[in-house]
Image (cartoon, rainbow, N blue to C red):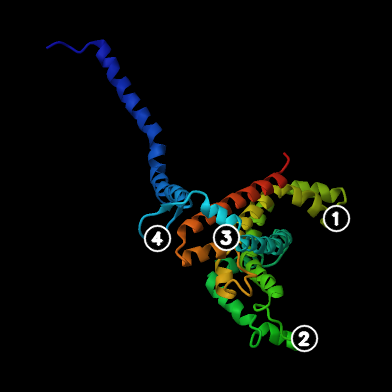
Amino acid sequence: MTAPTATATRRAPRAGRGTARLRRRAAPYLFVLPFVAIFAAFSVYPLFFTARLSFTDWRGTGAATWVGWDNYTYLLTNPAFWSSLGNSAILWLLIVPVQIVLGILVAVLLNNAKLRLRGLYRVAFIVPFVTPLVAVAQIWVVLFDQRYGAVNAFLGLFGLPDTGWLTTSAWAKPTLALLFLWKTTGFIVIILLSGLQSINASIYEAADLDGASKARQLWNITVPLLRRTIGFAVVLQTLAVFQMFAEPFVVTQGGPYNSTTTAGYYLYNHITRADLGTGAANSFLLVVLVMALSLLFVRLLRAKD
């Protein structure tokens, strides 16, 4: 037998090192592979399937009939579609600006180290967000009932007449907006509070030395340094408002006179009629609209470094 040459001896360790290096490089991809597979199966594939479905007439059974742009043309010329977008836009105006202002003020108060029971207050603000939405909506129906609701009973103590909070077009949207505010403002407070805690305290100390009032510090320091966080909150709530479904479904059923038929609730109507092609087109139009609004808000609220 011949002894192994020096060249073969050197190649063996190099081959082992190459295999180990390949394993190290492949390890991160193997770790993320389950997520990628699930994301592709339950997000990417449904997205492409819905895109194709939006160009067809399909009732859930049988073969889908290709109709081209007819579903989009029908929606863009349908007053009910634009009315649902208008309702969502009005709800956005009633909810998001109020929620951001209220969220900043509450977050500033909760960020105060001198506040007693600060941890308890933080938990109290997040409790409505984790409460089941359907249960809260049912409570809202009882509270704002025109005949037997506690709200009208309380207002009656001051001689005020009963108000149809859920049965009149003038009050249905504000009542729905109040439900959304009560349910989700605590979550926005937590987001803004996390942004506040990332601001260096020395900035406020310098402002105190310069004699700046708390109100001026809020406007000139806190709000500018929170622009990124505020932008994230606005985009998040824009998505939530235009997807709003459970609130009008449980509280008003889209009424009265379709005044609370939101974009999300109008999309549901296509599903109940098994008009899945039009529903898919509707969902894509909402995606485009919300994406455009989100990009606009991000640009407007973009922090300048």
Disc 3 and disc 2: Cα gap in Å?
35 Å
Pointer 4 residue: 60
- Give the answer, above or below, for where 299 lies relative to 258: above
- Give the answer, above or below, for where 176 lies relative to 208: below
Q: How crowded is mark 2: few (under 14 residues within 10 Å), some or many (20 or more)?
A: few
Pointer 1 residue: 213
Which is nearer the N-term, disc 4 or disc 2? Answer: 4
Numbered circle sitting on residue 160: 2
Q: Which of marks 4 and 3 is in front?
A: 4
Question: Quarter holding the C terminus?
Answer: top right
In this picture, residue 243 sits left or right of residue 271: right
Which is nearer the N-term, disc 2 or disc 1? Answer: 2
Q: Nearer the viewer, mark 4 or mark 2?
A: 4
Instruction: Evaluate if marks 3 and 2 touch, with contact meaning CB atoms under 8 Å apart.
Output: no
Q: How crowded is mark 3: few (under 14 residues within 10 Å), some or many (20 or more)?
A: some
Q: Which of marks 1 and 3 is in front?
A: 3
Which is nearer the N-term, disc 4 or disc 3? Answer: 4
Pointer 3 residue: 243
Q: How crowded is mark 4: few (under 14 residues within 10 Å), some or many (20 or more)?
A: few
Say which element carries label 4.
loop
Q: Which amino acid type is marked by label 1?
A: Ser
Instruction: Evaluate if marks 1 and 4 touch, with contact meaning CB atoms under 8 Å apart.
Output: no
